[in-house]
Amino acid sequence: MATNRTFTMIKPDAVEKNYIGGILKMINDAGFKIVAMKYTKLSKESAGAFYEVHKERPFYGELVEYMSSGPIVAAILEKENAVEEFRKLIGATNPADAAEGTIRKVYAKSIQANAVHGSDSDENAKIEGDFHFKANEIFA
Ligand code: CDP
Ligand code: MG
C-alpha cells in the first residue's frame, strides 16, 4: 500500500537561482503538505552516503560534488500516493524530456542540475526522510 509521504530536496542550482519560493509554491499548489523542512548543506560525506545506491554509476563522483556544492532545502511531503504523485510533479530526470508544467521543466537546467530530488519508492522515502530528520522534527 502506498504511504502518504515522500522526501524531496531543492538542489544547489535551484537554491542559488532563488527558485525556492517558486518550487515550494508548485509543491503546495499540487496539494502536498510540508510536514518537515530544513535549509542545510550536505558535506561530501553525507552527499556520498545519500546517493550510495548510485555508487557504481559513471556520474556518481560529479553528483556528490554538485550536491555538496551549496545549500539545499530538504523536506518531507504528505499527500495521498505521495511518491508517485510527486514523481509526476517533478518530471523526467533530464529536463529536456520533462513534461510541460513539471518542476524540472520550469526550473531545471541540466540532467545533473535538475532542481529537485524526489524519492522513487515508499521504502526509499522513509530511508531518505530519516536520513535528514529526527522524529521530533516532523510535524504531521
Ligand atoms: O533524480 P532521479 O530519480 O530522477 O534520477 P536518478 O537516476 O535517481 O539520478 C539521481 C540524480 O543523479 C539525478 O537527479 C541527477 O541529479 C543525477 N544524474 C546525473 O547527473 N547524470 C545522469 N545521467 C543521471 C542522473
Ligand atoms: Mg532517483
Image: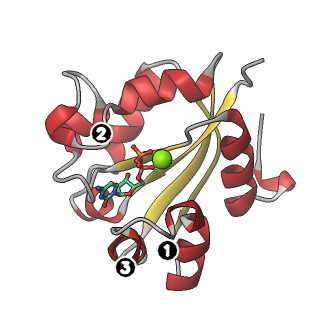
Q: Is residue 9 left or right of residue 77?
A: left
Q: Is residue 139 left or right of residue 11?
A: right
User: Which sits earlier in the primary sequence, circle 2 or circle 3?
Assistant: 2
Task: Give the answer, above or below, for where 33 lies relative to 64.
Answer: above
Task: Give the answer, above or below, for where 37 lies relative to 40.
Answer: above
Residue at the spot of label 3: 65
The residues bearing labels 1 and 3 have C-alpha atoms spaced at a distance of 12 Å
- Which numbered dot is residue 41? 1
Q: Residue at x 34, y 68 (%)?
A: 59
**Residue type, label 1:** Lys
Q: How many marks?
A: 3
Residue at the spot of label 2: 22
Q: Residues within 10 Å of mark 3 (few under 14, many from 20)?
A: some
Q: Nearer the viewer, residue 96 or 86?
A: 96
**Residue type, label 2:** Gly
Which quadrant does the C terminus fall into?
top right
Q: Position of residue 24 (x, y in %)?
A: 41, 38
Q: Position of residue 40 (x, y in %)?
A: 53, 69
Looking at the rendered structure, the secondary structure element under dot 2 is helix
Query: Is the CB–ligand 1 distance for label 1 below 8 Å?
Result: no
Q: Residues within 10 Å of mark 1 (few under 14, many from 20)?
A: some
Looking at the rendered structure, the secondary structure element under dot 1 is loop
Q: Hey, which residue is sitting farthest right in the picture?
A: 135
Q: Residue at x 63, y 18 (%)?
A: 81
Q: Position of residue 133 (x, y in %)?
A: 73, 58
Task: Give the answer, above or below, for where 32 lies relative to 95.
Answer: above
